[in-house]
Image (tube, helix red, strand yellow):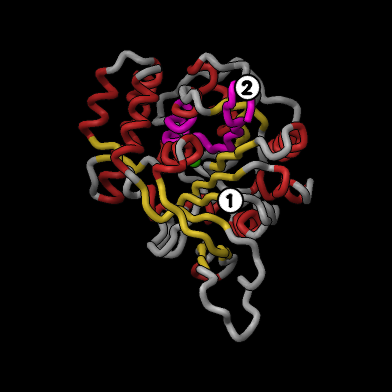
Amino acid sequence: MGEAGKKKVIIDTDPGIDDAMAIFVALNSPEIDVIGLTTIYGNVYTTLATRNALHLLEVAGRCDIPVAEGSQVSLMKATKLRIADFVHGTDGLGNQNFPPPNGRPIDQSAASFLVEQVNLHPGEITVVALGPLTNVALAIEQDPAFPKKVGQIVILGGAFWVNGNVNPATEANIFGDPEAADAVFTSGADILAIGINTTHQVVLTDADLEKLQKSNSKFCQYLCKILGVYFSYHREAYSIKGVYLHDPTTVVAAINPSLLTYTEGVVRVQTCGITRGLTLFDNTKKRYGEMTEWTGKPKIKVAVTVDAPAVVQLVMDRLINS
Ligand SMILES: [Ca+2]
């Protein structure tokens, strides 16, 4: 715990409209102290993610928080990346053409920053990972003791027992770097995975949007400018009048884990073929006759149920009362 018992949090992010919302919720939550942002490709390329992270901190008036730029390529050094700019706008923030930020990232890579911080504060850092897991996997490569030194890694990733959102097999953040995800899930760190099986229950509706629009808070005013593109995408892709709160739900899981329930097991990630990016959970109840690729691997926590109305309410409260 940090000052005044606050949880020290580093957010690894690819902003991203719901990343923006998640970051604002985190910055306005007294339970946690955001000590840095690290950036990654996903919704946009890494360079733009860094620019957006700096921009969002300027909007929030929190330029004191360092931004460390993450990897431009996947763990296996692939440069052909899946970028979801069709969900978030080509600028990642609702095609608003915001001016470039004044700030600059620190002179340290995301992985090095993560390693430095867990060594400075062993057992105290919570990493909230809202994009592909390349930076976290690189931190583990850089410091093999990283999984034991990090307090917890709360991950938005995976589609457990349900279809994915990239294709029927896989969820976007895991699909972004399956090798990194498999390395992180089997690293032995205290991991809490929030998959789309839970975040697809957490919907910000048109009526909720109207409430945000009526608020004078700077976070609400800003988000209402960028949310249009995200609502349009959901109407087309899912035929719903509302948007899924993937990243905000994951921040809420770090703030108040009791709003979700969890089960424990071993998760491996498919890294090839038509199901590349599939997250396969072994509940470890059966003793298989043969060794499997899951045998002896560390267990992680996977979210099973979510109190969706309470999560939406908490997100709204933190945005409106800012
Ligand atoms: Ca994200």
Which residue is located at x 56 percent, y 66 percent? 270
Counting from the top left corner in percent of width and height, residue 202 is at: 33, 44
Identify the image quadrant of the C terminus.
top left
Quarter of the image for the N terminus: give it.
top right
Q: Where in the figure is residue 95, as x and y percent of width and height?
A: 41, 29
For the residue carrying disc 1, how many other residues have a C-alpha within 10 Å: few (<14), some (14-19), or many (20+)?
many
Please tell me which residue is depicted at 60% across the width and 52% down the height of the picture.
Answer: 80
Q: Which residue is mark 1?
A: 191
How much space separates mark 1 and mark 2, taking CA atoms? 24 Å
* Range drawn in magenta: 1-24
Q: Residue type at mark 2? A: Glu
Residue identified by numbered label 2? 3
- Using residue 17 as the reference point, say whether residue 293 is left or right of it: right
- The one nearer the camera, 235 or 310, is 310
Crowd tier of the residue under label 2, counting other residues whose Cα lies within 10 Å: few below 14, some 14–19, many 20 or above? few
Of tags 1 and 2, the one toward the viewer is 2
